[in-house]
Image: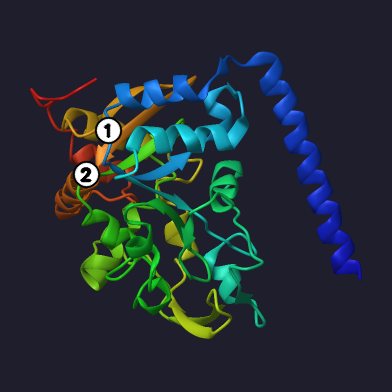
Amino acid sequence: MLEQAKRAARAALEAWRRAAGARHVRQNAPHVTRAGLAAGLERLGIAPGDTLFVHSSLKSLGYVEGGAPAVIAALQDAVGPQGALLLPAYYLPGGTVRAACAMPDYVFDPRRHGTHMGRLPEAFLASPGVRRSIHPTHSVCAWGRHAANLTEAHHRAPSTFGMGSPWQRFIGCEHAKVLGLGISMGPVTFYHALEDAMGEAFPVPVWEDETRLLACLDHAGRRWDVPVRPFDPAVARRRIDHPGREDLREYFQREFDAAGLRVNGQVGDAASWCIPAQAFYDHLCQLASEHVTIYASAAQLAARPVSQPSPHARA
């Protein structure tokens, strides 16, 4: 009973915070329409037929008339019926992979577990025609031409981000692009695809030694045991998404700009960017071969200056 009361109190507090935040944005932020968002995406180079892995900050867009569903509709308008959208739908009880692994009775159930990734993924997950992969910590949801292929059999992949996962399938899609709406180069899960692909050859030992098996139910209620390897918390504190690693985020921004891979633009009120997925992955491989990863120390960054700007770099 006490735990139920605590959950109810947390939910009520979160609802109050969201309502207060929405009022503030409505009163103070620029108003943005679905058509305006679609136009901004087009200027960013998003085109019909693209497959987008979207990482986003909804509040950074301004006050969107119609809210999160209008943003989703604008993304669908931008890629069209031959395109596809992929958004994170991660569910992380306890806040980390390690904490989820420590829960003795945790069973992921897509029929009742939502996502901790914010309002846009929440709204996308509830949208018509959206499919969700089965994974105890890092499920994703997809819409469009490649939705079934991107989300199927995630629970049978040997690692979260490796072969058979939505990330590796996404990289293989034609016109695949990673899209950051109002975010830095920090909170981008795409980086982990290289870690899983390289395994022990990755320059940094990012995982704990033990692989755990976490239970999942699929959409039909069948149970699966899925291999999950927690990140080493000491290494994670050096990662690009940690609040103290502004140096690493700025380095990656300058590096991908100088390489001519990152297209920058404004979507709504948000500074946004996109990078072709295969080129993103290939450049991460090149950086890793030069001892620069999303865990690089200040000394490693200093030893490998940012590339000279490409003559084909785009603003």
Q: Is residue 205 above or below residue 216?
A: above
Residue 149 vs residue 2, the one in the foreground: 149
Give the numbered dot on residue 161: none
Residue 173 is at least partly visible in this image = yes
Q: Is residue 61 left or right of residue 84?
A: right
> Residue 7, image x and y in percent?
81, 60
The answer to which quarter of the image holds residue 55 is top left
Separation of disc 1 and disc 2 at Cα?
9 Å
Which part of the image, by quadrant, shows the C terminus?
top left
Looking at marks 1 and 2 on the same chain, the residue that comes earlier in the sequence is marked by 1
The reply to whether the C-beta atoms of the residues labelled 1 and 2 are less than 8 Å apart is yes
Point 10% across, 27% down: residue: 310
Residue 175: numbered disc: 2
Q: Secondary structure at mark 2?
A: loop
Which residue is label 1 attached to? 47
Q: Nearer the viewer, residue 66 or 20?
A: 66
How would you rate the neighbour count of disc 1 (Cα within 10 Å): few for under 14, some for 14-19, many for 20 or more?
some
Position in image of residue 148 (x %, y %): 37, 63
Residue 233 screen position, x and y as percent: 49, 63
Residue at position x 20%, y 69% in the image: 201
Q: Is residue 46 above or below residue 209?
A: above
Q: Residues within 10 Å of mark 2 (few under 14, many from 20)?
A: some
Q: Please name the amino acid that badge 1 sits on.
A: Ala
Location of residue 228 by image quarter: bottom left
Pick the front one: 68 or 266? 68
The colour scheme applied to this rendered structure is rainbow
